[in-house]
Image: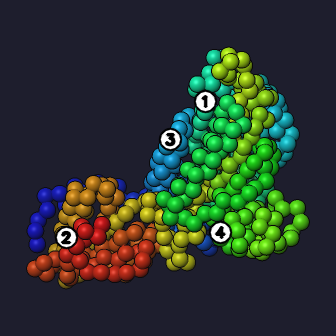
Amino acid sequence: APVSSHSRHIRPTLLVSRLYQPSNLRDVGQDTRLQGEMTCKSQRLMQQAGLIHPSNPGCYYYLPTAVRSMEKLVRVIDQEMQGIGGQKLDMPSLCSAVLWKTSERWDLMGKELFRLKDRHGVDYCLGPTHEEAVTTLVAHQVNLSYRQLPLLLYQITRKFRDEPKPKFGLLRGREFYMKDMYSFDVSEEAAYQTYESVCQAYTRLFTRLGLHCVQVQADTGNIGGKLSHEFQLPADIGEDRLLICENCSFSANVETIASDRNDCPQCETGTLVESKGIEVGHTFYLGKKYSHVFSATFSSAQNKPSIAEMGCYGLGVTRILAAAIEVMSTEEGIRWPGLLAPYQVCILSPKKGSKVDEATVIAEDLVHTLGETLPQLRGEVVLDDRAQMTIGKRLKDASILGYPYVIVVGQSALEEIPRFEVICQQTGETVFLNKDGLLDLL
Ligand code: ATP
Ligand code: MG
Ligand code: MG
Ligand code: MG
């Protein structure tokens, strides 16, 4: 067998034996950290694979493998938001009650708002959303000119909501990541255009992730405003009920439909079919609701102070991660949108003491070859070097974690032209390939 010069230099973070991904699935029903919480497939699989670890109701540790996926998701979201002119910022989570009293949401939010006092007895809340904060920020800018609009500001930060019933793991937490964007425009017409471009960016995002998502008319809730859509992933455990016309493009959250009639209000001939969805995104056209209250103005072309037209647009970042797992996975293992898989490839070295022990070096070499030959795989290939475990046991783990490609280095790797067993977990296919074939496939 060829001797590798690199074999002993695989980064510990690319060795499965060293990765911190503790499987922490106890019997979920008996787990006191989850007492009273309902669980679901994505939560079970994420705990089993060591992606998340429950801390207290509605709060989770996001473990290193989950953070990798999250960072990938954030990158795709950044691309789409910046593609339509979004500028990323970061606002305080500790929010002054004064702002929330000004918008009257201090009372409206009721028990969902996490409230606290500082040492001087001054009221604060932990931000559940940031209309007040961002509008105040923009209002502080003197000389904001119409030439600088539309202005689109967004952040990806933790949000806090004291949900009455946190459940389903990351799908409904009390502390979670949201992407929230806010737009400021010169006119109602311009604001509608911005609204439209954000909806298109959301659609592109879900298409890139390979997630089937429906855009439905939605209620504006206590965020307020005139026009609103939700982006819903159809799923049985979804908590929203959707009505979709089988004849035309009409689709709506039942909350928006006064009588539960089942004839379509748009085409009047089609029947509305009910299904369930997970709300992964929400867009609102706000008008002047917040800009008026906080005096967010710009100077117009006529050099007159004018109140900005606003929109706000949320994406549930941690919810998207869990929802994707929920809709794509089997009961036995996670299946990822390709872009979000924490690692693309897992290579299995032979079991220690087996006839093909010497193939270990070939497996180690392959980690380097793949990363060096295919730039997109740099840092994306891990070696399952837990040589004391059987291949079968390690394959099972690999199936739970859902690497898109699993490569078994065994007997056939020692042939004159080495061949590798490649399991494509997205399709379930298994093929035997030589090195060139492997590089072509990946
Ligand atoms: P829901 O109806 O599920 O309670 P919401 O309508 O209250 O959500 P929004 O205020 O519209 O939520 O927030 C924007 C996005 O943030 C939602 O579309 C969702 O994807 C995400 N989100 C809201 N609440 C949670 C939560 N408790 N855990 C995880 N993600 C959430
Ligand atoms: Mg809610
Ligand atoms: Mg909702
Ligand atoms: Mg919503």
Figure coloring: rainbow
Q: CA distance from mark 4 to mark 3?
A: 27 Å
Quarter of the image where the N terminus is located: bottom left
Task: Count residues near mark 4 (Cα–Cα under 10 Å), then give few for <14, some for 14-19, many for 20+.
Answer: many
- For residue 436, the mark is 2
Q: Position of residue 351 (x, y in %)?
A: 28, 77
Between 151 and 131, the residue placed more toward the observer is: 151
Q: Quadrant of residue 326?
A: bottom right
Query: Image height check: is 112 above or below 106?
Result: below
Q: CA distance from mark 4 to mark 1?
A: 36 Å
Q: Are marks 4 and 3 in contact (CB under 8 Å)?
A: no
User: Which residue in the structure is indicated by mark 4?
Assistant: 234
* Image point (66%, 26%), residue name: 138
Tell which circle, 2 or 3, labels the residue nearer the N-terminal end. 3
**Distance between the Cα atoms at labels 3 and 1?**
15 Å
* Occupied quadrant, residue 4: bottom left
| Quadrant including the C terminus | bottom left
Could you say which disc has been placed on residue 149 in the image? 1
Sequence-wise first label, 3 or 1: 3
Q: Is residue 104 left or right of residue 173?
A: right
